[in-house]
Image (tube, rainbow, N blue to C red):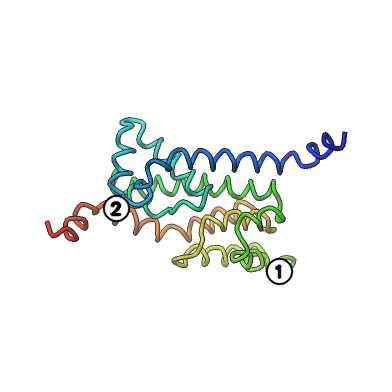
C-alpha cells in the first residue's frame, strides 16, 4: 500500500524521470556509434539530407532533442541548418525548434519541481534560479525577470538550454519566458545559420582550396 501511495504522490516526477531515461537511452544509441555527428557538420549534414523530403522534420526533431537533452552541443545543429537549408530557412527552423524545445523544458520543470531540477542542472548553475527569481513579489516582477532572461540568453557561453528548466521552477509565466528567451537567442542563431549557409566557402579557405 505504501508503494502504491508513493507512486500516486510522485507520479508526475516519476514520469519526468522516465522521460529523461528514455531520451538518454535514445541519444546513447543514436550517437554512440556515430560520435562524428557531434563534431563534423558535414557528417551531420549527410545524415539529415539522407532523409530526403523528411529532412526538415528530422532536423527539427534533432534540434528539439538537443535542447531537451542539453549536454549535446547546439551550435553544430545551427550551423548545419544554415548549411542545408540556407541562412533564412535554417534560422526559422532553429527558432521553431528553440520554441518547442524551450516549451518542453519549461513544463518539465513545472511538473518536476525545483528539488529535482536543481539536481538536473548541477550545482554550478544553481545561481540562475536566484538570478531569475530575485524580483519575485516586487513590482514589475515579470518585466524584470524577462529582462534578465533576455540578457542571459544574449550572453555567449551561457548554458542557454539549462535556462528553460530554471525558468520553469520560478514564478515567471510561460509567455514571458518564451518571448524573452527566444528574442535573446535570435542574434546567435542567425550568426550560426549564416555561417552555416557559407560553410563551403569557409571550409575551402581553411583547407586552402
Question: Residue 96 placed where, x, y %?
Answer: 45, 45
Task: Please state which of residues 126 and 172 is positioned toward the viewer in this rendering.
Answer: 126
- Residue for point 30% across, 43% down: 45
Choose top left, top right, bottom left or bottom right for residue 19.
Answer: top right
The answer to whether residue 72 is left or right of residue 208 is right
Res 144 visible: no
Count of numbered badges drawn on the protein: 2
Task: Give the residue number, with chain letter if any, for mark 2.
Answer: 196
- Residue for point 38% across, 49% down: 38
Quadrant of the snapshot with the N terminus: top right
Question: Residue 187 placed where, x, y %?
Answer: 40, 61
Task: Please state which of residues 162 and 198 is positioned toward the viewer in this rendering.
Answer: 162
Choose top left, top right, bottom left or bottom right for residue 9.
Answer: top right
Task: Please state which of residues 26 and 98 is positioned toward the viewer in this rendering.
Answer: 26
The answer to whether residue 119 is left or right of residue 160 is right
Answer with mark 2 or mark 1, whichever residue precedes in sequence.
1
Question: Residue 166 placed where, x, y %?
Answer: 62, 58
The answer to whether residue 9 is left or right of residue 77 is right
- Residue for point 52% across, 66% down: 152
Helix, strand or loop under label 1: loop
| C-alpha separation, residue under disc 2 versus residue under disc 1 | 43 Å
Looking at this view, name the residue that lies furthest to the left. Answer: 209
Question: Residue 56 placed where, x, y %?
Answer: 37, 37
Pointer 2: residues within 10 angstroms few (<14), some, or many (20+)?
many
Quadrant of the snapshot with the C terminus: bottom left
Res 70 visible: yes
Helix, strand or loop under label 2: helix
Task: Give the residue number, with chain letter if any, for mark 1.
Answer: 139
Amino acid at each position: 500500500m505504501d508503494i502504491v501511495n508513493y507512486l500516486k504522490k510522485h507520479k508526475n516526477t516519476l514520469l519526468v524521470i522516465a522521460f529523461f531515461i528514455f531520451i538518454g537511452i535514445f541519444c546513447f544509441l543514436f550517437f554512440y556509434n556515430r560520435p562524428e555527428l557531434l563534431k563534423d557538420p558535414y557528417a551531420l549534414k549527410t545524415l539529415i539530407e539522407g532523409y530526403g523530403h523528411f529532412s526538415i522534420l528530422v532536423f527539427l526533431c534533432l534540434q528539439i532533442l538537443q535542447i531537451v537533452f542539453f549536454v549535446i552541443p547546439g551550435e553544430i545543429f545551427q550551423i548545419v541548418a544554415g548549411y542545408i537549408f540556407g541562412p533564412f530557412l535554417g534560422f526559422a527552423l532553429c527558432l521553431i525548434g528553440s520554441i518547442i524545445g524551450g516549451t518542453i523544458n519549461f513544463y518539465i520543470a513545472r511538473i518536476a519541481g525545483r528539488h529535482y531540477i536543481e539536481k538536473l542542472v548541477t550545482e554550478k548553475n544553481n545561481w540562475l534560479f536566484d538570478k531569475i527569481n530575485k524580483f519575485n513579489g516586487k513590482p514589475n516582477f515579470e518585466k524584470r525577470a524577462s529582462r534578465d532572461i533576455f540578457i542571459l540568453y544574449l550572453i555567449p557561453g551561457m548554458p542557454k538550454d539549462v535556462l528553460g528548466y530554471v525558468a520553469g521552477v520560478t514564478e515567471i509565466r510561460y509567455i514571458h519566458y518564451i518571448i524573452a528567451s527566444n528574442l535573446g537567442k535570435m542574434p546567435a542563431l542567425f550568426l550560426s545559420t549564416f555561417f552555416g549557409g557559407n560553410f563551403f566557402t569557409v571550409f575551402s579557405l581553411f583547407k586552402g582550396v
